[in-house]
Amino acid sequence: MRSSVFQGRHLLSTRDYSKAELTWLIGFAEHLKDMKKHNIPHHYLEGKNIALLFEKSSTRTRSAFTTACIDLGAHPEYLGKNDIQLGRKETVLDTAKVLGSMFDGIEFRGFKQEHVEQLAEYSGVPVWNGLTDREHPTQMLADFMTIKEYFGKLEGINLAYCGQGRNNVQNSLMITSAILGVNYVNATPKELEPDPEILAVARKFAAESGATIRVTNDPVDAVENADAVYANVWAAMGEESKFAERVRLMKPYQVNAELVSHIKNPDWIFLHCLPAFHNAETEYAAKIKEEHGIDAMEVTDDVFYSDHGHQFEEAENRMHTIKAIMAATLGDLYIPYV
Ligand code: CP
């Protein structure tokens, strides 16, 4: 008999977890956060070896997995795209079999959802999706934990995502909101509306949870009843050639002082998975400013650094929630039901 409903499972998408399971994981992350703040040891993964595969760069996901492993008593091993043969000289299947024979768990950040799925199928150990082209499930645990910390609940909260409808964060936010009973609206231009497959999955979950799932081309309509407003980059890594078009399409969806003046709830919060282009002070943003004449993209400094901004708590929560999913799926904990 399994000692835990989570033991041995992967996290490839939040769609594989029930509302009760996601809620339990968020609650467990809150408990782990409390333990960390009180310096109470929680070595649930003592002696385990964890592979951290990164085909793309990362600040939060890499740091969160690394520190979470260390706090849990596990050994993290970073394997960057130039460190191993994956994709260049070795297939995902062969890599999965080799890594699975040496490591107890694998995190993967890469370009293709099918690759994280293959790692899960062939490695024989829990695999956690640290972002692919389709989804960003570990980000979701942190995002909804941050919302719950602030509002004390998730069900019935109104979340407005001002950003292009066709990216991994949007996909995961839409699906996870639907599972958890969070009312979700994506404000996006017509040209960038969400993939119908993602909408169909979300609407199926929403029928069970009672959440409303909407897409609108009107950013004011999206934010006026929002409790939480979420922004994301206008173009992902690898989409730089689309910048001129994205700036033109996305400018009306920028989260700025004018847009947020329409929000009715005075206690609304701003979220962002980060990194954010909220000024022109980075090398990358300065180049965008030079080429396209804009000082900020998806959010402006006055919103980002206002009291409404909770993106840095959200970033910290990546560590607590990643700890929760790793410990629950690999830690031999006694969790007979949720
Ligand atoms: N939010 C997020 O995934 O951040 P990184 O790209 O820095 O990991």
Image (cartoon, rainbow, N blue to C red):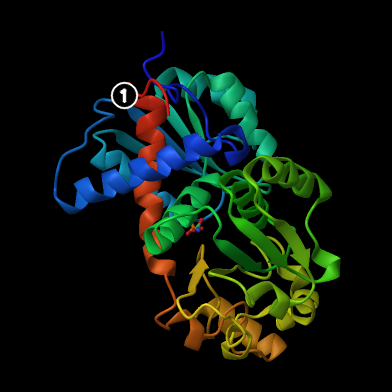
Task: Tell me if the residue at label 1 has its CB under 8 Å from ligand 1.
Answer: no
Total numbered badges shown on the rendered structure: 1
Where residue 41 appears, x then y in whole percent? 16, 39
Q: Is residue 186 left or right of residue 100?
A: right
Residue holding disc 1: 333
Residue visible at 31% across and 26% down? 48
At 45% from the left and 42% from the top, the residue drawn is: 23
Q: Amino acid at mark 1?
A: Leu
* Image vertical order of residue 314 relative to residue 270, above or below: above
Q: Check the image and report above or below for 170 versus 6.
A: below
- Please identify the residue farthest to the right as the structure is shown: 191
Q: Position of residue 336 (x, y in %)?
A: 38, 20
Whether residue 165 is visible: yes
Whether residue 67 is visible here, answered yes or no, is: no
Residue at 42% from the left image edge and 70% from the top image edge: 310
Q: Mark 1: which secondary structure?
A: loop
- Which quarter of the figure is the C terminus placed in? top left
| Residue name at image x 58 percent, y 83 percent | 260
Please state which of residues 79 and 182 is positioned toward the viewer in this rendering.
182
Q: Tell me where residue 51 appears, x and y as whole percent.
A: 42, 34
Q: Quadrant of residue 257?
A: bottom right
- Tell me if mark 1 has few (under 14), some (14-19) or many (20+) residues whose alpha carbon lies within 10 angstroms of its own: some
Q: Please state, as top left, top right, bottom left or bottom right, where the N terminus lies in the image.
A: top left
232 to 77, vertically: above or below: below
x, y percent for residue 40: 14, 43
